[in-house]
């Protein structure tokens, strides 16, 4: 097994960590009606706003600085409206980056599709988040140990299968937002970098 240092020297700089972010409840707040129900559009999509735009911006910029690729791994359906929503979300914090770290145009993964069942349009999961992470790991980052890959999600049942495979997981808290600080720790953000970012 080659060391990451050897790979860097011979193949050019490679990421040492990878982060998968759930969308709703992790970085975004789904749109709701006045009665509290999700505001579902005719195509099955739901709008969203930032949980905390500045915390998300910090996360993305630190990941870019540390050469850590970011991915959205969402339970939302694979719809163009969802792609557009997440693309705008990333663009709003200058999250797209041509280098190693940050988001790319192909950094969006959806585990669901909208299908017709008995004349009704319903969301159905077609794969698991664990399967997506394993696939991306093997195809793009096979040199990385499992613990160098992190999934952040606000639903424990999505985290459990990923954790069983040896990957790092973090339960997001959409109320306290403490998971943003924990992600920065995973990235390896030093105190001096945090101070510099805030000045």
Image (cartoon, rainbow, N blue to C red):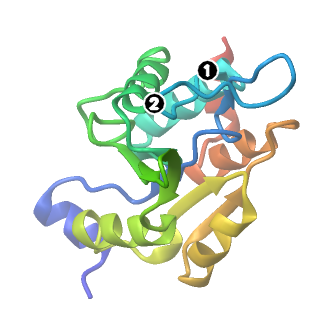
Image mark for residue 173 = none
User: For the residue carrying disc 2, how many other residues have a C-alpha within 10 Å: few (<14), some (14-19), or many (20+)?
Assistant: few
In the figure, residue 127 lies in which quadrant? bottom left
The image position of residue 169, as x and y in percent, is 64, 65
The image position of residue 154, as x and y in percent, is 72, 51
Quadrant position of the C terminus in the picture:
top right
**Left or right, residue 81 beside residue 153:** left
Task: Farthest residue to the top: give it.
Answer: 199
Q: What residue is drawn where x is 47% and y is 76%?
A: 146
Say if 181 sits above or below 81 in the image: below
Q: Which residue is mark 2?
A: 43
User: Which circle's residue, 1 or 2, is located before the other in the chain?
Assistant: 2
In the figure, residue 198 lies in which quadrant? top right
On the question of residue 128 being in view, the answer is: yes
**Left or right, residue 195 beside residue 139:** right
The image position of residue 148, as x and y in percent, is 49, 67
Q: What residue is drawn where x is 57% and y is 59%?
A: 151
Q: How far is mark 1 from mark 2, CA to CA?
A: 40 Å
Q: Which residue is mark 1?
A: 197
């Amino acid at each position: 097994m080659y060391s990451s240092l050897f790979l860097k020297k011979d193949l050019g700089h490679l990421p040492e960590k990878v982060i998968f972010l759930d969308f709703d409840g992790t970085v975004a707040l789904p749109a709701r009606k006045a009665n509290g129900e999700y505001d579902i559009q005719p195509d099955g999509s739901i709008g969203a706003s930032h949980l905390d735009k500045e915390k998300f911006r910090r996360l993305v910029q630190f990941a870019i600085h540390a050469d850590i690729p970011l991915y959205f791994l969402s339970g939302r359906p694979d719809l163009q409206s969802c792609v557009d929503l997440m693309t705008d979300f990333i663009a709003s914090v200058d999250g797209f980056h041509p280098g190693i770290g940050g988001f790319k145009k192909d950094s969006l993964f959806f585990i669901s599709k909208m299908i017709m069942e008995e004349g009704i349009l319903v969301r159905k999961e077609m794969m698991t988040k664990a399967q997506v992470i394993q696939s991306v790991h093997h195809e793009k980052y096979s040199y990385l140990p499992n613990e160098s890959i992190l999934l952040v999600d606000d639903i424990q049942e999505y985290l459990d299968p990923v954790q069983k495979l040896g990957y790092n997981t973090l339960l997001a808290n959409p109320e306290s937002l403490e998971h943003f600080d924990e992600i920065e720790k995973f990235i390896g953000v030093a105190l001096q970098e945090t101070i510099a970012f805030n000045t």
